[in-house]
Image: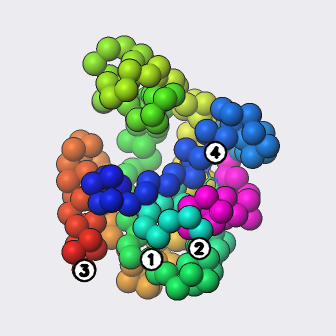
Amino acid sequence: MAERFGVRHASTGEIFRQAAADGSELGRTVKDYLDSGGLVPDELTSRVVEEMVVGRSDSYLLDGYPRTLRQAHDLDAMLGRRGQELDLVVCFELDDGQALRRLTGRLVCAECGENYHREFMPPQAEGVCDGCGGPLKVRSDSAEEVVRNRLAQYDEKTRPLVAYYEERGLIERVDASPAPQEVTRRTEALLSRIASR
Ligand code: AMP
């Protein structure tokens, strides 16, 4: 989707997973948080976003950031320093039961980061990415108890952001329960409105 709109896709989870796979200092610091489903500390996360995303590009789609009120304030501050503004916040809504089924069955391409699901979106050949032919891996945070922790973290720390952005008239909700193609179609329609402004 980012490609279609000519913006950069910036996923903090992907940045952290890549760092952990590379064994860099950042990766060693964040690995335990990733494996347990806990959140990486705000200060570190916001520093990474400012250094690797906001400070380097003008247009981006932030995926998985901000996840706490403190991060939302950090984002406001870093955008303010550059005279930039948020265009839109998209909130994907899904009940916990469905989220659990989706998150425990995930497969991700070790080469290009494409996502699959064992049951709902299997690759054409088992264990192989349809797009680039890379090997598919189970994410280290797919175990049920880790996913339950991720959902609890969301409730406690991320859900308050909905009201925060609602007050500023920035949020659009997308029902994430239909099939991926339909969720994509609805999300693209929202982003098209921004792109044509
Ligand atoms: P994701 O790929 O977005 O599901 O993120 C995977 C994991 O990376 C999360 O469970 C956290 O441990 C960490 N992470 C990603 N984004 C953030 C964030 N904005 N703040 C704190 N931790 C994060």
Residue 124 is inside the magenta segment: no
Instruction: Mark 4 or mark 1: name the one nearer the start of the chain.
Output: 4
Q: Which residue is mark 2?
A: 75
Which residue is under mark 4?
Answer: 16
The residue most toward the front is 56
The kind of secondary structure element at disc 2 is helix
| Residues in magenta, as a range | 37-54
Q: CA distance from mark 2 to mark 4?
A: 18 Å
Cβ of disc 3 within 8 Å of ligand 1? no
Foreground mark, 2 or 3? 3
Q: Nearer the viewer, residue 113 or 157?
A: 113
**Under tag 4, what secondary structure?**
helix
Query: Which is more N-terminal, label 2 or label 1?
Result: 2
Residue on which the image places disc 3: 197
Q: Is mark 4 within 8 Å of ligand 1?
A: yes
Which sits earlier in the primary sequence, circle 3 or circle 4? 4
* Distance in Å between CA atoms under marks 4 and 1: 23 Å
What kind of residue is marked 4? Phe
Q: Quadrant of residue 130?
A: top left
Question: Looking at mark 2, is its residue's CB closer than 8 Å to ligand 1?
Answer: no
Residue at image mark 1: 86
**In the image: residue 186, left or right of residue 37:** left
